[in-house]
Each structure stands twice: as structure tokens, then as C-alpha cells.
Image (cartoon, rainbow, N blue to C red):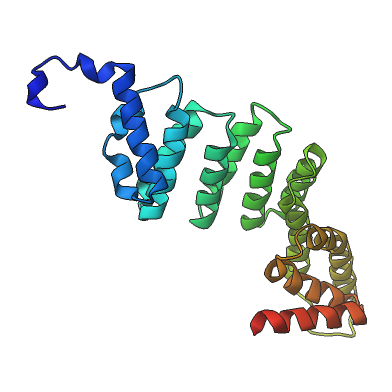
Amino acid sequence: QHPIWGENKQVTTKAGYTAAAQLYLWAAYHSKNWAETNRYRALALADTLTARRTSLEMLSLAAEALGDTADYRTLLLLGHKDYPSHPFFFTHLADFYARSGQYDSQLALANGRLATDAADAWALEAKSLALINLKRYDEAIIAAESCIAADSTHIDAWYYVGLAYYSMAKAIVLPANINSKAYQAAVAQQKQLYTLAQPYMEEYRMKKPDEKAKWAPILYQVYFSLNLGSRFEEMEQIIKTLAD
């Protein structure tokens, strides 16, 4: 890289030189010296056969730690393009789009992966979340249930089905006249949706008992609406502990 080599840069293409750059990146990353991971970045990524994928993973996580969202996204897109079957880049990119409110981009990303494999559980899970945020609840339920059918270990899919039914129930506007048939019909529809949400949210609670902040408020509303007194009281106590 310096004038001592003159115009001949062939040394930088040798395997040992590339390996040294990758080792430097590895050491900087594991030392949490995030900025230093980029010192020999181009050299580390020149290797297309062995450690390039791992280098891209470390560089992207370092960019995230540095708060460089533009570089984080760029590295994830590069990794996803070069290693489309590897879940790391897809899941982190999908999460990035979700956190930044880019739900259409998250949906497009998921659909692109599903075009290759319609039963890809990672993509179905991401698609479900994107559709929930886009308020396309019926489609979200289909995607999440397809995810569960493809791989039931994707626990968040259970939550997404329950959340979609819950969101549909919450979206129902009750007429002002509580004695009207329209009001009674709306209440019945709301209860039906809460009933559909209940088993999925309870399953999610069983699978992820520590995620109280996610399932407790929803089950609180479900149990209250379905007049399940003892279960409602339990949720009330759990929510109080969360507040404390």
C-alpha cells in the first residue's frame, strides 16, 4: 500500500496478505475496536472463497455499533446479494427495515426471498411482521400461519398471528348507541377476533415466558373482553410488576 512497492501491487493479492487483513479485522472486532475493523476492509473482502462472508458479518455489526446506519445497510445488502441463502444478512436487514419504519422495503425483501423458496420460514416471518405494520392483517395471518407450518420453532410467528387478530379487534369502531343492533354486532365480531387471538398469544407466552411486556398487555385485553376473570386478574398483576 506504500511507495516502497512502486507501481507493482501484486503483493496485495497474495493469500497471506489477505489473510493478515482478515485477522486484523477479526482482532479489532473481538476487541470491540469498531472503527479499526475498517482499516483493511477492502483487502479483507477481496477474498471470495473462505472468510469473506464472516468478514461481512463482522463489518456490518461493527457499523451498527458505530451507529453508521448507512454503512450498516450497505454491508447487509452486499451480504444478502452475495449470500442469499444465509439467514444472517436477511434477518438483520429485515429487522433494520422494521425498526426504521420501512415496511414496504421489508415486505419486498421477504417476497424476493420467497420467490426462490415459498416455504422459507425466515421470509414468511418477516413478511408477516411487515404486513401487520402495514395493517394488512388478513395477509399477515396467512404468512405467519404458513411460517408455523414450515417451521414451528419460529416462535415469533405465533405472536404475529395473535397480534394480527388482536389488532383487527382493536380497529373495530363501536357505535355510540349501546342498545343498537350495530353495536351488538360489532361487540360480537370483536369478541370473535379476541377469541381467535387467545390461543396464539397463550402459546407464545408458554414458549417465551420472559417476554411479559409483549404478551401480558394483549392477554389482559383479551381476557377482559372475554370476561375471563381469574386470567384477567393474573395479567393485571403481571402488568403491575412490569410497571414497577
Quarter holding the N terminus is: top left
Quarter occupied by residue 163: bottom right
- Residue at (42% x, 21% y) in the render: 48
Quarter occupied by residue 181: bottom right
Residue 45 location in percent, x, y?
A: 36, 28
Residue 2 location in percent, x, y?
A: 11, 27
Residue 92 location in percent, x, y?
A: 53, 45
Relative vertical location of residue 173 with respect to residue 179 in this rendering, above or below: above
The answer to whether residue 208 is left or right of residue 100 is right
- Residue at (52% x, 56% y) in the render: 99
The answer to whether residue 11 is left or right of residue 58 is left
The answer to whether residue 197 is left or right of residue 61 is right
- Is residue 162 at all visible to an observer of this figure? yes
Relative vertical location of residue 146 with respect to residue 168 in this rendering, above or below: above
- Is residue 72 at all visible to an observer of this figure? no
Q: Judge by depth and name the residue closer to the eye, 227 or 30.
A: 30
Relative vertical location of residue 105 with respect to residue 113 in this rendering, above or below: below
Q: Judge by depth and name the residue closer to the eye, 155 or 170.
A: 155
Q: Judge by depth and name the residue closer to the eye, 101 or 5.
A: 5
Q: Judge by depth and name the residue closer to the eye, 111 or 181.
A: 111
